[in-house]
Structures are given as structure tokens and as C-alpha cells.
Image (cartoon, helix red, strand yellow):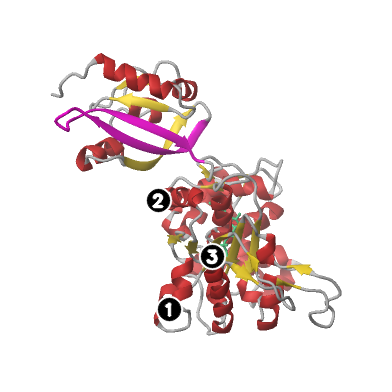
Amino acid sequence: MSPIQPQSTLATIAAMLDAVPDPRIVITPDYHIRHANPAYRAAYGDDAVGRTCFAVSHGYARPCDEEGESCPLKATLASGQPERVLHIHRSRHGDEHVDVELSPMSDVSGYPLLFVEKMKPLALASSQAVPDRMVGRSAAFRRMLLLAQRAAPSGVAVLLQGESGTGKEGLARAIHDGGGAARPFVAVDCASLTETLLESELFGYEKGAFTGATQRKQGLVEAANGGTLFLDEIGDLPPSQQVKLLRLLESGTFRRVGGISSIPARFRVIAATHRDLAQMVRDGSFRADLYYRLAVFPLRLPPLRERQEDIPLLAEALLARVAPGRALALSADALAWLLQHPFPGNIRELRNMLERASLLCDGSHIQPEHLWLDALAQPAANPDGHFHSPLLPLAGLEQRYLAWALASHPGDRASLAAALGMTERTLYRKLAALQAAAGTVDATQ
Ligand SMILES: Nc1ncnc2c1ncn2[C@@H]1O[C@H](COP(=O)(O)OP(=O)(O)OP(=O)(O)O)[C@@H](O)[C@H]1O
């Protein structure tokens, strides 16, 4: 067992921690809280001392690693160094993402006697269904968040890579906001910058620089001064333009179109792309020197299929966003349907689907057919003739098509049956089956 540390050591550490505004605790190697500073007691309760950290922070009966979480204390014991993890803590403000750092305090022989746990609630994202922030609780989301949390205050160039709709622009804004006081965030869509537009859009122009330049115009680089320049779809920037961007980043200066003086530009750069930029460098379509300037801190955003357990939380937050004041919820069957949907368009597809479902739903619970109608409205096949979706049971597909046909056909049942190429009797039989399926949905609400 560990030697008992002198009480004076604990008293000295405690006095230092009490002066810190963020929550801090001192814990023993067997997880017991020996001291909690006022900020910790205000967030987690006055009765923390004497209890275990996993009970107070998580409500667990066993250490975090036995509950499927990472345990910073175990990691610190193994490495002998400070260790940092992102946990969801149960505080008086509800569940929140907390950046946890544990540092060992060792005796003269190097044996860790005590550990100081520093906690910093995360402003980048929420673990609750709030409509105006990035939300998520899954391990994939938290891994990304912890990296973003490290990059945010540093001002380093960040490259965000992820499929379309995974939240790259949202994360870019969160990283920018996490970098300190209010400063400009200027987004540039590189895919829409033509050869001629690039210089005038990015660098601005002087009066009389070209026909129509009736007065001096500030460019986006100048507008981002002191803040962040967000280069969206950077992989779509043609090589002729990549060199101009590289020159700007290397020299830290630019010249307005028609201007003669070099103007210094101070900004942080965050770039985003859905393309595999490293592969583009290998096949020669993206400059390696620009890539290394932009990818100082590369961050991958997981597709929604890798964070499926976030779908209920995301859906709740997105419903509050798209239908404010309606208290709309998903029925159990609608949620089950969402959980099996592949979401090639990621969170944007989920958001659009819920927005349309909210318009189709008159009650308080969105049903599967409100979501099916949306899926059916999308083109079934891409131009190569391949279907987007994985294989679906034909019977289910027929029911979804029937529900859509019923809702959108303007005529009576006889003309609907004729349009579908079946007898009225067959149509009624199929509609009865559809109603029975819808009845199951209502019963599970
Ligand atoms: N973690 C999240 N929590 C809540 N909403 C999110 C989250 N991530 C993304 N969204 C929402 O999903 C939508 C798409 O996000 P965003 O535009 O940031 O994606 P993107 O990856 O930049 O897409 P693209 O590559 O097509 O430009 C937005 O409405 C955004 O608010």
C-alpha cells in the first residue's frame, strides 16, 4: 500500500487549488476525493470529499474503465505522466463535456501518492439537445472534440476533413470561438472562386483597377484580419489558384488588385474539404507545400454512420432548431427507422429530413411515413444508374411508395389504382396492409 503522505503536503496543494476558478480535486490512488476546491463543490455538490471521483462525476458504482469509459487515473499510473481525456460529467448544470487532466504527485521515490484532477467544461459542443450548438456524446464525436479542444486556443492552422454534411463549417466556427475574444470569422467558398474572382475577392481592389471598380473594396483576407479565414472546399481550388494562396500564407502579405503596396495580413487559417487531400498531393492535383501549410493540425470528422448512437440526441436538437416552439418528438418506430438509415448526406441529410417531416406531421410525434415520404422524394438512382441506398426489402419499398402515392395523388382511388396499374380491389387490399402497419406505429408511440 502507498506510504501515507504528510498532511502538510495535502494542505499546501489544497490551498493552491482553492484559489483556482475552475473545478479541481485531489484524489488518492483508490479514487477517493481528499480535497475539492470551491469551484468543484459549486458544480458537483458539497458532499464530494470522502466519496469516489467516479461516483461524484458520473454516478457510477465502479471505476470509469469498468463502465466502458477511459480512466485517466489508470492511464497516469501506467505512464507516470499527466493524462488528458474528455468525459461527460454529471454536474449541477446537467450533463456536460469536460476536459479532464490528471497529474500525479509523487513521493521522493517517484511513487504517486496523490493525483490532482483539473476539469474544464467544454464550450465547443454540448452533450445535451441544445438547438444552437454542436451536439454529440458518442466516442467518435468525443475523440474529435478533444483534438479540436487542443487546437482551438493555439491559433494553429487546422485542416478539417470529412464527408459532406458532417459539420465541418460548424466545427470551424467552434474552433474559432474557442480561440478567444470576439474576432471576425470569414468564410470563403473555394469551389466558387473563378480565376478572375480569386484575387479581387480575397485581396480586394483599388479604385480604377478595372472597369466597374468605382471605389476601393476590401477583400476577404483584410476582413479576416485578427480573426479566422475559413477556406471551405479547399480541395476544389485549381492549381493555378493554389499558388496564389500559398504566396499569401508564406509571405503573410497581399496586394490589392491595382495596388502597389504590400499589406500585412494576420489571420488564423482553417481549411475544410470532403476530398482526400493527401491522396490529391500524391496524384499531383494538390500542391504539397500548400498542403503542409494547411494541415498543421489535421482533424477528421466522423460520418454519421460511425456515430449512430448520437442520432436520438441530434434529432432532438435539430427538431428544436427546425420547429421551434412545437415540442415535436420522434415516435419509437420513426427513431428505429432513422437508426437503420445509412445517411450518405450525414447530419445535413438528417436535418433536412426532420425539417420536411415537421411540415408533414400535424401531431406531436413524427411517424416513419413522414420520413419515408422524404426518402421517396429523393432521386432513386444517380446518373450512372446505381441506387444510392443499400438493398431494401421489396415489400417495405412498395409500402413506402404506396404511402407517397396516396399522399400525392390528386384524384380518387379508382384513378390511383389505374395509374398504378392495378385493380381497385388490389389497391384496397394493399392500403389495408399499409394501414395495419401504420396502426403498429401508433401503438408504439
Ligand atoms: N454536431 C452537430 N450538432 C448539431 N448540428 C450539427 C452538428 N454537426 C453538423 N450539424 C448541422 O448539420 C448541417 C451541416 O453542417 P455543416 O454545414 O457544418 O457541414 P459541412 O461538413 O461543412 O458540409 P459541406 O461539406 O457540405 O459544406 C448544419 O445544419 C449543421 O448545423
The residue mark sitting in front, 2 or 1, is 1
Q: Any magenta on residue 120?
A: yes
Relative to residue 34, is residue 420 drawn left or right? right
Tell me the distance, in whole angstroms, between the alpha carbons under discs 2 and 1: 26 Å
Disc 1 is placed on an element classified as helix
Q: Looking at the image, which residue is at 78% across and 74% down? A: 206
| Residue that badge 2 annotates | 143
Taking depth in this image into account, of 351 and 37 the one nearest to the observer is 37
The amino acid on which the numbered mark 2 sits, given as a three-letter code, is Arg
Give the main secondary structure of the magenta stretch.
strand
Q: Quadrant of residue 110?
A: top left
Q: Which residues are magenta?
A: 94-122
Disc 3 is placed on an element classified as strand
The amino acid on which the numbered mark 1 sits, given as a three-letter code, is Val
Question: Residue 345 at what x, y percent from top left?
Answer: 54, 65
| Residue that badge 3 annotates | 271
| Residue that badge 1 annotates | 281
Q: Point out the tag, 1 or 3, that comes first from the N-terminus.
A: 3
* Up/down of 88 relative to 432, above or below: above
* Up/down of 234 relative to 137, above or below: below
Ligand 1 within 8 A of label 3's CB? no
Report whether residue 345 is seen: no
Q: Looking at the image, which residue is at 44% across and 84% down? A: 284
The amino acid on which the numbered mark 3 sits, given as a three-letter code, is Ala
Where the C terminus falls, by quadrant?
top right
Q: Residues within 10 Å of mark 2 (few under 14, many from 20)?
A: some
Report whether residue 363 is seen: yes
Q: Point out the tag, 2 or 1, that comes first from the N-terminus.
A: 2
Taking depth in this image into account, of 296 and 61 the one nearest to the observer is 296
Q: Which mark is residue 94?
A: none
Q: Looking at the image, which residue is at 57% across and 45% down? A: 180
